[in-house]
Image: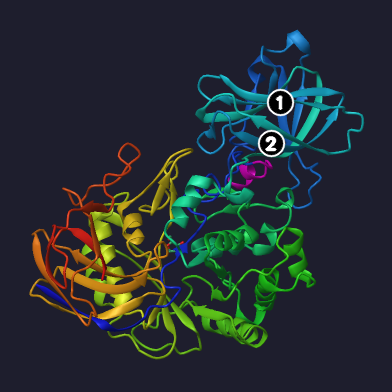
């Protein structure tokens, strides 16, 4: 096989080509990227999710009849009225040792690390003076990891007070709980109990190790917040942006009925925009266009949703003096966010009212914000759309063989009209596991096909991005984590091989081969570290045999000897191999020896591998 590259001719790859898609699925945000440690901080989540009212909070001392715990609707927050009530029946030494109270295990254990600081905030009112101890303890061993005291005077039982303390951890336990205990008889109400590590990214609330993993993908856009999460199983549970902004303690929270868990909406619309900005990515906001998985809003009743979308755009980019822009400013971001893309719904094409609703959104947004690029849910890759759009959405979940074959998917797509946004792609089901090499190599071929067709595909993102290993609602995913660890699946590492592609130059190249298993592309990019131009040749071998590939590079101004070269290969001994917490780096791109780089050279391609060659001429 031979790859002939013309280094003198090519075309620009869109600046936005590679990005990420964040959705609240698999506890990606709540119990994941959003660093809040308390699960169900406002006590609304239990009943909403058809679980015990205070789930997953536990009562300390109940079995000794020293306390009763209930909920009522006495919260000071209008949008989340449920508060927790503790009737403390014991006093002093008559209480069980350690006192009585409640404890929250977080999302499968809070990660508490020695020396780190945690901000604990809660709202409280009481009947009678009550001294509280707020502490982190190991969930299994009960060992205390840091604590603070809070005195509630209880002079005015109707008055809620906000309490804030920093707890510095004196020990480490990845499976800890937050406890609030007392030995004082009386009645105490609690609401909106939060515990956040202080070392979140820029203090913006994003768990730092997970943020870094996403940032290392160098995403040029962030599509959010879904996905089906935007639609909901029923519209009453859909993500509605207005419920997710403003002070966190005032947010309503909602049942993520698609992925079956309660979300306090700590990572709401504002935080999604902030996340995009922090990643250096352009936000792509997907809003609800009147559809869930079970109900539809007809076009003649869609206006409130249109108004909601317009208000959402104003929230993101209106001046700080505007109605919704001023709310954004009050949340700490007076400057507008750089919102240039919106998607009108998710996977709703073909539904009865889709096109009617779509046009209502399209026309008014085009008029009001002519620069905003609008994304249709309808697939225009084979036949042109029958409605106006700037971009059309394309999703694909399939097996490895089929994903590999899709490297030609856009070869015959219309070359004019809206561009494609492959906003969700992944190999899934039987040959994907929790992220297999086989899946990743097939996806690499698909991405090479996208790179080669980047005149018609302007954006691409893998889905889903994040998996809390304790909630495998959807596998595989790019990044797997628990309370304190994380690793990338091979699919994640494939994406890392494309981080230089956005905004690079795609060079013309021809692959002469009789092997149906080889797919290749070449880019020229500027290395941000040394400021020099490199050629990057990426080749997939999706076959069981070693392949020899000759590479000829024409059109270089130099004598043909690269002054530097490096080759990395992503492969493994078994196609179903995966990374794991015990072997997080089993399958990652590895540097291999490559001494014979020149403008005419030979490369051996391992079975089921992705090879990436960087050449500085
Ligand atoms: O990525 C998981 C889900 O797959 C998304 O929520 C949805 O858009 C698609 O069906």
Asked if the residues shown at circle 1 and circle 2 are in contact, with their CB atoms under 8 angstroms apart, the answer is: yes
Could you tell me which secondary element the residue under label 2 belongs to?
Answer: strand
Q: Which residue is outermost to the right?
A: 155
Q: Is residue 39 left or right of residue 183?
A: left
Q: Is residue 615 left or right of residue 273?
A: left
**If the image is split into quadrants, where does the C terminus sit?**
bottom left
Q: Determine the residue positioned at 84% across, 30% down.
A: 126
Decide if ligand 1 comes within 8 Å of the CB at mark 2: no
Magenta residues? 41-49
**If the image is split into quadrants, where does the N terminus sit?**
bottom left
**What label sits on residue 481 in the rendered view?**
none
Of the pair 276 and 182, the residue shown nearer to us: 276
Q: Determine the residue positioned at 50% across, 51% down.
A: 211
Q: Quadrant of residue 367?
A: bottom right
| Residue 548 placement (x, y as % from top left) | 8, 65
Question: What crowding class fits label 2: few (fewer than 14 Cα within 10 Å), some (14-19), or many (20 or more)?
Answer: many
User: Does residue 43 show up magenta in the picture?
Assistant: yes
Q: Is residue 107 visible?
A: yes
């Amino acid at each position: 096989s031979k790859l002939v590259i013309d280094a003198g001719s090519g075309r620009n790859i869109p600046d936005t080509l590679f990005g990420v898609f964040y959705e609240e699925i698999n506890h990606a945000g709540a119990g994941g990227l959003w660093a809040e440690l308390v699960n169900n901080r406002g006590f609304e989540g239990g009943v909403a999710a058809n679980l015990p009212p205070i789930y997953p909070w536990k009562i300390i001392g109940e079995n000794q009849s020293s306390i009763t715990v209930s909920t009522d609707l006495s919260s000071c927050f209008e949008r989340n009225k449920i508060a927790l009530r503790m009737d403390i029946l014991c006093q002093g030494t008559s209480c069980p040792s350690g006192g009585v109270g409640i404890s929250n295990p977080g999302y499968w254990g809070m990660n508490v690390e020695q020396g780190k600081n945690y901000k604990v905030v809660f709202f409280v009112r009481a009947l009678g003076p009550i001294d509280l101890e707020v502490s982190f303890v190991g969930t299994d061993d009960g060992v205390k990891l840091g604590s603070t005291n809070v005195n509630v005077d209880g002079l005015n039982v109707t008055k809620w007070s906000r309490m804030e303390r920093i707890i510095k951890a004196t020990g480490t336990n990845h499976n800890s709980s937050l406890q609030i205990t007392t030995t004082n008889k009386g009645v105490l109400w609690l609401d909106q109990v939060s515990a956040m590590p202080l070392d979140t990214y820029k203090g913006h609330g994003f768990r730092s190790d997970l943020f870094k993993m996403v940032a290392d993908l160098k995403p040029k856009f962030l599509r959010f917040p879904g996905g089906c999460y935007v639609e909901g199983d029923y519209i009453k549970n859909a993500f509605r942006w207005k419920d997710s902004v403003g002070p966190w303690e005032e947010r309503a929270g909602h049942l993520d009925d698609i992925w079956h868990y309660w979300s306090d909406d700590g990572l709401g619309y504002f935080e999604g925009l902030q996340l995009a900005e922090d990643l250096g990515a352009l936000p792509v906001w997907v809003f609800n266009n009147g559809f869930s998985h079970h109900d539809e809003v007809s076009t003649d009743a869609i206006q409130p949703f249109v108004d909601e979308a317009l208000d959402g755009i104003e929230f993101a980019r209106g001046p700080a003096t505007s109605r919704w822009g001023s709310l954004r400013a009050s949340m700490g971001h007076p400057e507008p966010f750089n919102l240039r893309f919106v998607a009108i719904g998710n996977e709703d094409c073909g539904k009865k009212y889709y096109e009617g609703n779509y046009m209502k959104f399209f026309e008014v947004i085009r008029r009001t914000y002519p620069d905003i690029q609008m994304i249709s849910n309808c697939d225009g890759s084979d036949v042109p759309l029958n409605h106006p759009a700037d971009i059309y959405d394309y999703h694909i979940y399939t097996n490895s063989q089929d994903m590999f074959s899709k490297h030609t998917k856009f070869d015959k797509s219309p070359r004019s009209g809206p561009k494609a946004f492959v906003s969700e792609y992944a190999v899934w089901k039987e040959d994907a596991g929790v992220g297999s090499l086989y899946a990743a190599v097939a996806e690499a071929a698909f991405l090479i096909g996208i790179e080669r067709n980047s005149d018609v595909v302007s954006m691409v993102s893998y889905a889903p991005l994040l998996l809390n290993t304790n909630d495998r609602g959807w596998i595989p995913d790019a990044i797997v984590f628990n309370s304190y660890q994380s690793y990338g699946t091979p699919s994640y590492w494939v994406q890392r091989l494309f981080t230089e592609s956005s905004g690079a130059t795609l060079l013309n190249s021809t692959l002469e081969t009789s092997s149906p298993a080889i797919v290749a592309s070449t880019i020229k990019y500027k290395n941000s570290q040394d400021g020099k131009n490199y050629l990057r040749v990426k080749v997939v071998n999706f076959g069981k045999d070693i392949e020899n590939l000759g590479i000829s590079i024409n059109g270089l101004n130099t004598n043909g000897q690269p002054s530097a070269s490096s080759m990395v290969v992503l492969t493994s001994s078994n196609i179903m191999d995966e990374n794991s917490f015990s072997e997080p780096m089993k399958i990652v791109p590895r540097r291999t020896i490559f001494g014979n780089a020149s403008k005419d050279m030979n490369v051996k391609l391992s079975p089921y591998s992705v090879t990436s060659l960087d050449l500085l001429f």
